[in-house]
Amino acid sequence: MRSAGIDKIVIETLQCATGLTNTNQQLVASPLYKQISAQIVRGFYTERLLVDLGDKLVGLAEHAYGLRQGDALVKLSQTLLALPLPSQYQSAARFFLALGLRRRGQQEVGNSVLERVASEPQHLYSARALQSLGGVIQDLGDYELALKVYSKAARCAGENGRLASASVFAQKNIATIHGLKGDHQRAVAELERLTPFVRAIGPIHPHVYYDYLNSLAVELANVGRLEEAAGTARIAISSPFSAAYPEWKETYNEIALKQRRASHSIVAVRWATARTRRIEEPTSDNNNLVQLT
């Protein structure tokens, strides 16, 4: 199988993807990358080589998604779509293409692609597309409908053990919705219950772990657990993804402000209490008075 067009797309995309992180620079220097490049230049493809390439491109797309890099997502998705890969890679490509288009401001087109993926037979990216559509609805302020969509995504993912990550994404968003509706105690309980599962998928989806910590910090602050909230938010803003998520820094600053206000309130109450005691307690001079007849 030979195609100069595919050769050009793959080479340009892999070169573009190398700018994402140092991790991807290591990919370029790896024997696998050199092998793929050599095979592409010569125009020879094998099924195994294509699958390996597809896996690498999907991994790069996940990373670009975590860094909110819309242009990179679109290019990687187009490369996946251009390659003769199995259907699951095509679904992944459409999912990431939808996210990339939305990140570039093309919400309507991106939403349409998400709906197409969500309507496909149950697989990892159909569940994640449902979860993403729930986010679209949440942003529009319809929390009840968003809850239903998130619940459906979690249910679809839960029916297949291989879709654990999609289930975690959806359940984290469900907890967030409860917080937005004012039920902060429930939100904290549900988020804390998810902690071991989020940690388990952290090596695969690190940005999800830090975004989860940000959500947990918000809800901990809302129930008055300010010290825990500050420590949790501090981990999020110290991550390599923080530059792409300015809202994490906002969360940390808001918690710090609440801590200062709480500290000032405690000082004011203690000062007022001490002043009242000084007024009410008798002085030593009064105790030394002698009654004269």
Image (tube, helix red, strand yellow):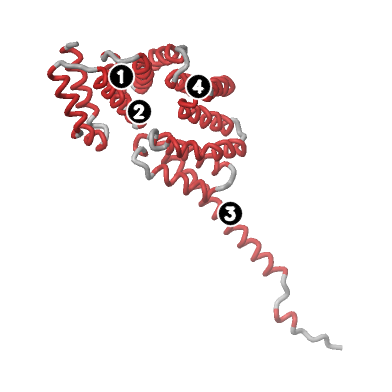
Determine which residue is flagged by label 1. Answer: 77
- Label 3 vs label 4, nearer the camera: 4
| Left or right placement of residue 246 versus residue 23 in this view | right
Considering only order in the chain, which callout, 4 or 1, is on the residue closer to the N terminus? 1
Find residue 62 and name its label: 2
Q: In the image shown, does 289 or 9 lie closer to the viewer?
A: 9
At mark 3, the secondary structure is helix
Do residues under tags 3 and 4 come within 8 Å of each other at their CB atoms?
no
Which residue is farthest bottom? Answer: 293
Q: Amino acid at mark 3?
A: Ser
* Residue at point 30%, 28% (across, down): 60
State how far apart marks 2 and 4 are (Cα).
19 Å
Determine which residue is flagged by label 3. Answer: 265
Do residues under tags 2 and 3 come within 8 Å of each other at their CB atoms?
no
Residue 141 seen by the camera: no
Considering only order in the chain, which callout, 4 or 2, is on the residue closer to the N terminus? 2
* Residue at point 37%, 42% (across, down): 239
* Residue at point 54%, 50% (across, down): 261
Mark 2: give few (<14), some (14-19) or many (20+) Cα within 10 Å.
some
Considering only order in the chain, which callout, 2 or 1, is on the residue closer to the N terminus? 2
Mark 4: give few (<14), some (14-19) or many (20+) Cα within 10 Å.
many
- Label 1 vs label 4, nearer the camera: 1
